Image (cartoon, rainbow, N blue to C red):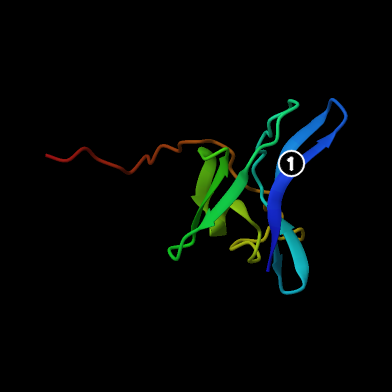
Amino acid sequence: PLSPPGPDICGPGTKKVHVIFNYKGKNVLINKDIRCKDDEFTHLYTLVVRPDNTYEVKIDNARVESGSLEEDWDFLPPKKIKDPEAKKPDDWDERAKIDDPEDTKPE
């Protein structure tokens, strides 16, 4: 299910478009900040979702954002999770390049 896309205008600081999917019982918001129009007129907000998992957000039929569903929403857990227990060994060498004294130039 999808909540209809639309504006969220809360005072002078918040003027953005919400695009929310309900995935596995949780509301998942878009990771991008999409600015909405802030005037006295009515506007048409449109979300196009394509079979190749891409999307397009339009305001008054003009594209304002597009991209990949997988990249712009956190539907899936991250592919890599930082291990809080991981630490560098005490003898870790921080130099970016280390010369090999036994290396020889090719002939």
| Residue 20 showing in the rendered view | no
Question: What is the quadrant of residue 76 in the picture?
Answer: bottom right
Query: How far across and how far down the image is residue 8, in percent?
Result: 79, 41
User: Is 56 situated above or below 39?
Assistant: below
Q: Residue furthest front?
A: 41
User: Is 15 situated above or below 47?
Assistant: above
Residue in view at x 72 percent, y 74 percent: 24
Judging from the image, what secondary structure is the residue with disc 1 in? Answer: strand
Query: How far across and how far down the image is residue 98, in percent?
Result: 45, 38
Q: Left or right: where does residue 96 sit relative to residue 94?
A: left
Q: Residue furthest bottom?
A: 24
Q: Left or right: where does residue 100 sit relative to residue 22?
A: left
Query: How far across and how far down the image is residue 69, in percent?
Result: 55, 57
| Residue 102 showing in the rendered view | yes
Tell me if mark 1 has few (under 14), some (14-19) or many (20+) residues whose alpha carbon lies within 10 angstroms of its own. some
For disc 1, the marked residue is 7
Q: Left or right: where does residue 46 sit relative to residue 96?
A: right
Q: Residue furthest right?
A: 11
Residue in view at x 51 percent, y 45 percent: 66
Residue in view at x 77 percent, y 67 percent: 26
Q: Nearer the viewer, residue 92 or 40?
A: 40
Q: Nearer the viewer, residue 33 or 78?
A: 33
User: Is 5 situated above or below 60?
Assistant: below
Q: Which amino acid is tagged 1? A: Pro
**Figure quadrant of the C terminus:** top left
